[in-house]
Image (cartoon, rainbow, N blue to C red):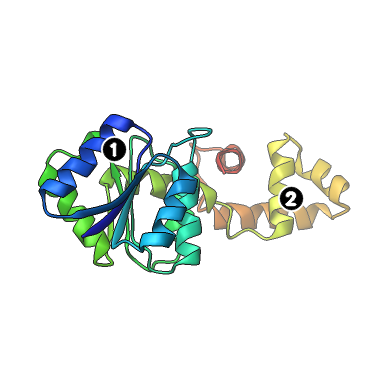
Amino acid sequence: MRVVIAEDSAILRAGLVELLNLRGHEVLAAVADGESLCAAVREHRPDVSIVDIRMPPTHTDEGLRASIALRAELPGCAILLFSQYVETQYATELLADRAGGVGYLLKDRVAEVSDFLDALRRVADGETVLDPEVVSQLFTATRKTDALAGLTPREREVLGLMAEGRSNSAIAARLFLSAGSVEKYVSSIFGKLALPQSEGDNRRVLAVLRYLES
Protein backbone atom coordinates (compact mmCIF):
# COMPACT_ATOMS: atom_id res chain seq x y z
CA MET A 1 0.00 0.00 0.00
CA ARG A 2 0.97 3.62 -0.58
CA VAL A 3 0.49 5.40 2.75
CA VAL A 4 0.54 8.92 4.21
CA ILE A 5 0.98 9.25 7.99
CA ALA A 6 -0.14 12.22 10.09
CA GLU A 7 1.02 11.86 13.70
CA ASP A 8 2.42 14.60 15.93
CA SER A 9 4.37 12.24 18.19
CA ALA A 10 7.79 11.95 16.56
CA ILE A 11 8.49 8.56 18.13
CA LEU A 12 5.18 7.02 17.11
CA ARG A 13 5.42 8.56 13.64
CA ALA A 14 8.88 7.05 13.13
CA GLY A 15 7.66 3.71 14.46
CA LEU A 16 4.75 3.60 11.99
CA VAL A 17 7.09 4.47 9.12
CA GLU A 18 9.49 1.66 10.05
CA LEU A 19 6.69 -0.84 10.59
CA LEU A 20 5.10 -0.16 7.22
CA ASN A 21 8.39 -0.14 5.37
CA LEU A 22 9.37 -3.49 6.91
CA ARG A 23 6.06 -4.97 5.76
CA GLY A 24 6.66 -3.87 2.18
CA HIS A 25 4.45 -0.79 2.09
CA GLU A 26 5.50 2.62 0.80
CA VAL A 27 5.26 5.62 3.10
CA LEU A 28 4.85 8.62 0.82
CA ALA A 29 4.91 11.25 3.56
CA ALA A 30 4.97 11.39 7.37
CA VAL A 31 3.76 14.72 8.76
CA ALA A 32 2.84 16.21 12.13
CA ASP A 33 -0.22 18.44 11.53
CA GLY A 34 -3.50 18.63 9.65
CA GLU A 35 -2.43 21.23 7.12
CA SER A 36 0.57 19.15 6.09
CA LEU A 37 -1.68 16.07 5.90
CA CYS A 38 -3.98 17.77 3.41
CA ALA A 39 -1.03 18.91 1.30
CA ALA A 40 0.54 15.44 1.29
CA VAL A 41 -2.69 13.68 0.32
CA ARG A 42 -3.37 16.15 -2.49
CA GLU A 43 0.16 15.65 -3.80
CA HIS A 44 0.57 11.89 -3.47
CA ARG A 45 -3.01 10.52 -3.62
CA PRO A 46 -2.17 7.56 -1.30
CA ASP A 47 -4.13 4.34 -1.02
CA VAL A 48 -4.82 5.19 2.61
CA SER A 49 -3.81 7.73 5.26
CA ILE A 50 -3.19 7.04 8.95
CA VAL A 51 -4.32 10.09 10.92
CA ASP A 52 -4.01 11.03 14.56
CA ILE A 53 -6.91 13.18 15.76
CA ARG A 54 -5.23 15.61 18.15
CA MET A 55 -2.45 17.51 16.45
CA PRO A 56 -1.01 21.06 16.45
CA PRO A 57 -1.81 23.83 16.92
CA THR A 58 -4.58 23.22 19.50
CA HIS A 59 -4.24 19.45 19.94
CA THR A 60 -8.03 18.96 19.91
CA ASP A 61 -9.49 17.68 16.65
CA GLU A 62 -7.27 19.00 13.84
CA GLY A 63 -6.66 15.59 12.31
CA LEU A 64 -10.33 14.70 12.27
CA ARG A 65 -11.38 18.00 10.72
CA ALA A 66 -8.64 17.69 8.11
CA SER A 67 -9.91 14.20 7.28
CA ILE A 68 -13.44 15.51 6.78
CA ALA A 69 -12.14 18.23 4.48
CA LEU A 70 -10.14 15.72 2.45
CA ARG A 71 -13.13 13.38 2.09
CA ALA A 72 -15.24 16.28 0.83
CA GLU A 73 -12.55 17.35 -1.64
CA LEU A 74 -11.46 13.87 -2.70
CA PRO A 75 -14.42 11.44 -2.47
CA GLY A 76 -13.27 7.94 -1.60
CA CYS A 77 -10.09 9.19 0.05
CA ALA A 78 -9.34 6.37 2.52
CA ILE A 79 -8.67 7.47 6.10
CA LEU A 80 -7.77 5.39 9.16
CA LEU A 81 -8.08 7.47 12.33
CA PHE A 82 -5.63 6.19 14.93
CA SER A 83 -6.02 7.91 18.27
CA GLN A 84 -6.18 7.56 22.03
CA TYR A 85 -9.49 9.41 22.12
CA VAL A 86 -13.03 9.08 20.81
CA GLU A 87 -14.22 12.37 19.34
CA THR A 88 -17.92 11.84 18.69
CA GLN A 89 -19.02 15.13 17.09
CA TYR A 90 -16.84 15.17 13.98
CA ALA A 91 -16.42 11.39 13.80
CA THR A 92 -20.15 11.08 13.18
CA GLU A 93 -19.83 13.62 10.38
CA LEU A 94 -16.92 11.69 8.86
CA LEU A 95 -18.96 8.49 8.79
CA ALA A 96 -22.19 10.12 7.62
CA ASP A 97 -21.59 9.74 3.87
CA ARG A 98 -21.42 5.92 4.25
CA ALA A 99 -19.00 5.80 1.32
CA GLY A 100 -16.62 3.41 3.08
CA GLY A 101 -12.89 3.66 3.21
CA VAL A 102 -12.95 4.93 6.79
CA GLY A 103 -11.55 3.42 9.97
CA TYR A 104 -11.25 4.46 13.60
CA LEU A 105 -8.97 2.51 15.93
CA LEU A 106 -7.89 3.33 19.47
CA LYS A 107 -4.15 3.11 20.02
CA ASP A 108 -4.40 1.48 23.43
CA ARG A 109 -6.75 -1.25 22.17
CA VAL A 110 -4.72 -2.57 19.24
CA ALA A 111 -3.27 -5.79 20.62
CA GLU A 112 -1.52 -7.16 17.53
CA VAL A 113 0.39 -5.55 14.68
CA SER A 114 -1.35 -7.94 12.30
CA ASP A 115 -4.73 -6.61 13.41
CA PHE A 116 -3.65 -3.05 12.69
CA LEU A 117 -2.30 -3.92 9.25
CA ASP A 118 -5.43 -5.90 8.42
CA ALA A 119 -7.60 -2.92 9.37
CA LEU A 120 -5.42 -0.63 7.26
CA ARG A 121 -5.77 -2.92 4.25
CA ARG A 122 -9.54 -3.14 4.67
CA VAL A 123 -9.88 0.63 4.86
CA ALA A 124 -7.73 1.00 1.73
CA ASP A 125 -10.08 -1.48 0.02
CA GLY A 126 -13.08 0.70 0.82
CA GLU A 127 -14.40 -0.97 3.97
CA THR A 128 -15.40 0.71 7.23
CA VAL A 129 -13.47 -0.52 10.26
CA LEU A 130 -14.40 0.68 13.74
CA ASP A 131 -13.16 -0.26 17.19
CA PRO A 132 -16.10 -1.59 19.27
CA GLU A 133 -15.48 1.10 21.90
CA VAL A 134 -15.75 3.76 19.21
CA VAL A 135 -19.04 2.25 18.03
CA SER A 136 -20.38 2.24 21.59
CA GLN A 137 -19.53 5.89 22.24
CA LEU A 138 -20.78 7.06 18.85
CA PHE A 139 -24.06 5.21 19.42
CA THR A 140 -24.49 6.79 22.84
CA ALA A 141 -23.75 10.27 21.51
CA THR A 142 -26.10 9.83 18.53
CA ARG A 143 -28.88 8.45 20.71
CA LYS A 144 -28.65 11.50 22.99
CA THR A 145 -28.56 13.88 20.05
CA ASP A 146 -31.56 12.26 18.38
CA ALA A 147 -33.65 11.80 21.52
CA LEU A 148 -35.80 14.81 20.65
CA ALA A 149 -35.64 14.42 16.87
CA GLY A 150 -39.30 13.40 16.60
CA LEU A 151 -40.67 16.42 18.44
CA THR A 152 -42.24 19.34 16.61
CA PRO A 153 -40.90 22.85 17.24
CA ARG A 154 -43.92 23.61 19.45
CA GLU A 155 -43.40 20.38 21.44
CA ARG A 156 -39.76 21.30 21.97
CA GLU A 157 -40.86 24.71 23.17
CA VAL A 158 -43.31 23.13 25.64
CA LEU A 159 -40.66 20.70 26.85
CA GLY A 160 -38.18 23.55 27.31
CA LEU A 161 -40.65 25.36 29.55
CA MET A 162 -41.26 22.12 31.45
CA ALA A 163 -37.50 21.98 32.04
CA GLU A 164 -37.76 25.46 33.58
CA GLY A 165 -40.16 24.01 36.12
CA ARG A 166 -43.32 25.61 34.73
CA SER A 167 -46.73 24.01 35.22
CA ASN A 168 -49.14 23.34 32.35
CA SER A 169 -51.14 26.45 33.23
CA ALA A 170 -47.99 28.58 33.28
CA ILE A 171 -46.93 27.15 29.92
CA ALA A 172 -50.37 27.88 28.50
CA ALA A 173 -50.15 31.49 29.64
CA ARG A 174 -46.61 31.88 28.30
CA LEU A 175 -47.45 30.46 24.84
CA PHE A 176 -50.97 31.90 24.65
CA LEU A 177 -52.49 28.41 24.43
CA SER A 178 -55.43 26.80 26.12
CA ALA A 179 -54.78 24.43 29.02
CA GLY A 180 -56.23 21.60 26.92
CA SER A 181 -53.77 22.29 24.09
CA VAL A 182 -50.82 22.17 26.47
CA GLU A 183 -52.06 18.87 27.90
CA LYS A 184 -52.21 17.45 24.37
CA TYR A 185 -48.66 18.64 23.65
CA VAL A 186 -47.38 17.13 26.89
CA SER A 187 -49.14 13.83 26.16
CA SER A 188 -47.64 13.78 22.66
CA ILE A 189 -44.17 14.45 24.10
CA PHE A 190 -44.52 11.51 26.48
CA GLY A 191 -45.55 9.28 23.58
CA LYS A 192 -42.73 10.31 21.27
CA LEU A 193 -40.15 9.90 24.04
CA ALA A 194 -41.52 6.42 24.80
CA LEU A 195 -42.51 7.29 28.37
CA PRO A 196 -45.61 5.20 29.18
CA GLN A 197 -47.72 5.97 32.22
CA SER A 198 -46.32 4.30 35.32
CA GLU A 199 -47.05 4.43 39.03
CA GLY A 200 -43.36 4.30 39.87
CA ASP A 201 -42.05 6.95 37.45
CA ASN A 202 -42.72 10.66 37.07
CA ARG A 203 -42.96 11.07 33.30
CA ARG A 204 -42.59 14.82 33.50
CA VAL A 205 -39.24 14.50 35.27
CA LEU A 206 -38.07 11.79 32.86
CA ALA A 207 -38.99 13.94 29.86
CA VAL A 208 -37.05 16.88 31.28
CA LEU A 209 -34.03 14.61 31.85
CA ARG A 210 -34.13 13.57 28.18
CA TYR A 211 -34.26 17.22 27.24
CA LEU A 212 -31.26 18.08 29.40
CA GLU A 213 -29.25 15.10 28.11
CA SER A 214 -29.75 16.19 24.51
Residue at the disc numbered 2: 157
Label tally: 2
State how far apart marks 2 and 1 are (Cα): 50 Å
Above or below residue 211? Residue 39 is below
Q: In terms of secondary structure, where does tag 2 sit?
A: helix
Q: Amino acid at mark 2?
A: Glu
Query: Residue 186, how many percent across, how many down?
Result: 67, 52
Badge 1 element: helix
* Along the viewing direction, whichever of 17 and 149 lies nearer the viewer: 17
> Quick one: label 2, few (<14), some, or many (20+) residues within 10 Å?
some
> Could you say where residue 183 lies in the image, as x and y percent from the top left?
72, 53
Please identify the quadrant where the C terminus is shown.
Answer: top right
Q: Quadrant of the N terminus?
A: bottom left
Q: Position of residue 120 (x, y in %)?
A: 22, 54
Task: Establish if 42 lies above or below 131.
Answer: below
Sooner in the amino-acid sequence: mark 2 or mark 1: 1
Residue denoted by label 1 = 13
Residue 34 location in percent, x, y? 47, 45
